[in-house]
């Protein structure tokens, strides 16, 4: 019985020993990554640097407006008695737009015409008086030379003759003044009839027949309507001061209009403002923008050059017959292509990060210090080192190259960028494998020399 208990105890001891050995060995193999599926390093995604054409983009939003738009305001005040157009009508140059009641201006012309005739009659009277004074002066001049009349009588007739000459000139000037007033009144009468200054479409009609309007006398007159060339539209956008330096005249653009989603239209920069538009001046939210005009060169509004409505039939293939119909005030987003680099080394934007080289040097020195220092001394030294780091800050752009499964920090110089990629001007070659993600690993935790577990190898092989 005792032998049986001894055998059982030995068996239990051996089982415990074997279990301990298996547990210790399994833990070691798992830690080494041989079993258990453990990662051998930091999990990252990689991509190869490639030769790519990059176009730098400046994006801005704005409104569509006619490139040529004439605001129609009356030069004279009065009541509208004729308004033969309505909003949306196409008009030709010289067509009647508005007629203002002319009665008061016609009455003014009649009054000034009578005044002019009166001044002409007075002129004739003055000329007759001048002839009479001239005759008297000539006669007295002969008598004076013969000593028949006194010098005083001679001077009186001479003065009367000079006075009549001056009166004749004054009468002539009064006639010219009356004629000028009459011409002005006639011009005002003509301004009661307003005609189209150019071909275009009537937009923004703001008056009705019978309404009284104010003329451009001392203040701006009533805005009655606008005549616009709708087949020549542009986008007025505001570009931030940080981007405006990259924009130049005749830059190519891509325009996206909210009313036509998933469609792009071509454009070209035609005008760049020199004066800034400042909002929130003097506050922390101050924004400085510059207005840029972008002409839409894609054919549009082709049905806006006629003055008659015609029935239309839907085309069999709408895509082939598609012509956009832009209206003033539509919202649009413009991507201005400011610069293009052809066949340059490029990488995804997120792969380029920054590192403080001065801090890395300090960290390396810190690792070499003894761990037996007094805690208080460590705190003082740490504060001093923090101050030194601020002074020695050395921020540089880097990427992490993948060499033999290890992250190698590589300083790079960058050029232009588009929405997804950035140009590398120095530090990389086409074909170099680099780390592109994830974001937290790249921006914070990944350091030079870290072992890597590339998680996208399988995906790359499938492709």
Image (cartoon, rainbow, N blue to C red):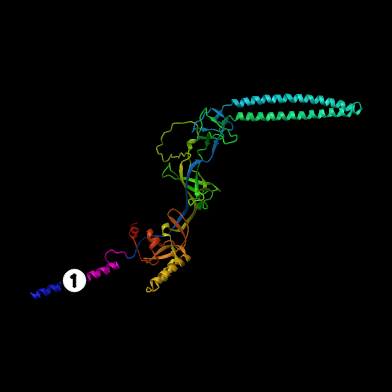
- Percent across and percent down for residue 362 are 43, 69
Task: Tell me if residue 252 comes above or below residue 197 in the rendering.
Answer: below
Residue placed at 85% from the left, 29% from the top?
A: 155
In the picture, measured across the screen, residue 111 lies left or right of residue 374, that is right
What is the span of residues highlighted in magenta in the rendered image? 20-39
Of 28 and 120, the residue lying toward us: 120
Task: Tell me if residue 404 comes above or below residue 316 in the rendering.
Answer: below
Residue placed at 76% from the left, 24% from the top?
A: 125
- Percent across and percent down for residue 274 are 56, 48
Quarter assignment of residue 27:
bottom left
**Does the image show residue 26?**
yes
Q: Residues within 10 Å of mark 1 (few under 14, many from 20)?
A: few
Residue at the far left: name it: 1
In the picture, measured across the screen, residue 103 lies left or right of residue 419, that is right
Main secondary structure type of the part rendered in magenta: helix
- 36 falls in the magenta region: yes
Q: Which residue is mark 1?
A: 16
Quarter assignment of residue 142:
top right
**Does the image show residue 296?**
no
- Percent across and percent down for residue 448 are 40, 66
| Number of numbered callouts drawn | 1
Of 126 and 445, the residue lying toward us: 126
In the picture, measured across the screen, residue 176 lies left or right of residue 308, that is right
- 454 falls in the magenta region: no
Task: Tell me if residue 119 comes above or below residue 330 in the rendering.
Answer: above
Position of the C terminus, as image quadrant, is bottom left
- Percent across and percent down for residue 291 are 52, 47
Position of the N terminus, as image quadrant, is bottom left
Give SS at disc 1: helix
């Amino acid at each position: 019985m005792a032998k049986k208990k001894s055998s059982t105890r030995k068996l239990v001891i051996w089982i415990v020993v074997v279990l301990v050995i298996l547990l210790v060995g399994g833990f070691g193999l798992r830690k080494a990554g041989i079993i258990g599926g453990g990662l051998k390093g930091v999990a990252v995604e990689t991509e190869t640097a490639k030769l790519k054409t990059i176009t730098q983009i400046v994006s801005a939003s704005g409104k569509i407006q006619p490139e040529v738009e004439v605001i129609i305001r009356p030069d004279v005040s009065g009541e509208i008695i004729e308004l033969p157009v309505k909003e949306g009508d196409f008009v030709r140059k010289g067509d009647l737009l508005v007629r203002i009641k002319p009665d008061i201006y016609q009455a003014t012309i009649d009054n000034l015409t009578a005044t002019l005739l009166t001044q002409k009659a007075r002129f004739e009277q003055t000329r007759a008086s001048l002839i009479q004074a001239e005759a008297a002066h000539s006669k007295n001049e002969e008598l004076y030379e013969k000593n028949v009349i006194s010098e005083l009588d001679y001077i009186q007739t001479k003065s009367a003759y000079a006075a009549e000459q001056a009166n004749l000139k004054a009468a002539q000037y009064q006639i010219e003044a009356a004629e000028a007033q009459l011409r002005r009144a006639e011009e005002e009468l003509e301004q009661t009839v307003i005609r189209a200054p150019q071909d275009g479409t009537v937009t923004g009609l703001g008056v009705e027949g019978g309404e009284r309007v104010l003329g451009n006398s001392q203040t701006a007159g009533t805005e009655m309507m606008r005549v616009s060339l709708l087949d020549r539209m542009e986008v007025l956008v505001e570009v931030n001061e940080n981007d405006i330096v990259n924009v130049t005249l005749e830059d190519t653009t891509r325009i996206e209009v909210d009313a036509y989603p998933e469609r792009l239209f071509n454009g070209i920069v035609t005008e760049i403002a020199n004066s800034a538009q400042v909002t929130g001046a003097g506050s922390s939210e101050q924004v400085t923008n510059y207005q840029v005009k972008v002409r839409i060169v894609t054919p549009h509004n082709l049905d806006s050059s006629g003055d008659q409505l015609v029935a239309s039939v839907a085309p069999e293939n709408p895509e082939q017959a598609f012509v956009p119909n832009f209206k003033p005030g539509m919202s649009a987003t413009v991507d201005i292509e400011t610069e293009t680099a052809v066949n340059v080394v490029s990488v995804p934007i997120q792969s380029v990060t920054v590192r403080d080289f001065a801090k890395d040097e300090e960290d390396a020195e810190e690792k070499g210090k003894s761990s037996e220092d007094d805690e208080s001394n460590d705190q003082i030294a740490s504060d001093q080192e923090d101050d030194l780091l601020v002074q020695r800050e050395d921020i540089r752009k880097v990427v992490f190259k993948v060499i033999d499964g290890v992250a190698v920090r590589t300083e790079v110089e960058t050029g232009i960028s588009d929405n997804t990629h950035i140009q590398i001007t120095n530090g990389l070659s086409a074909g170099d494998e680099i780390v592109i993600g994830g974001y937290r690993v790249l921006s914070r935790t990944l350091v030079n020399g870290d072992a890597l577990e590339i998680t996208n190898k399988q995906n790359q092989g499938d492709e």
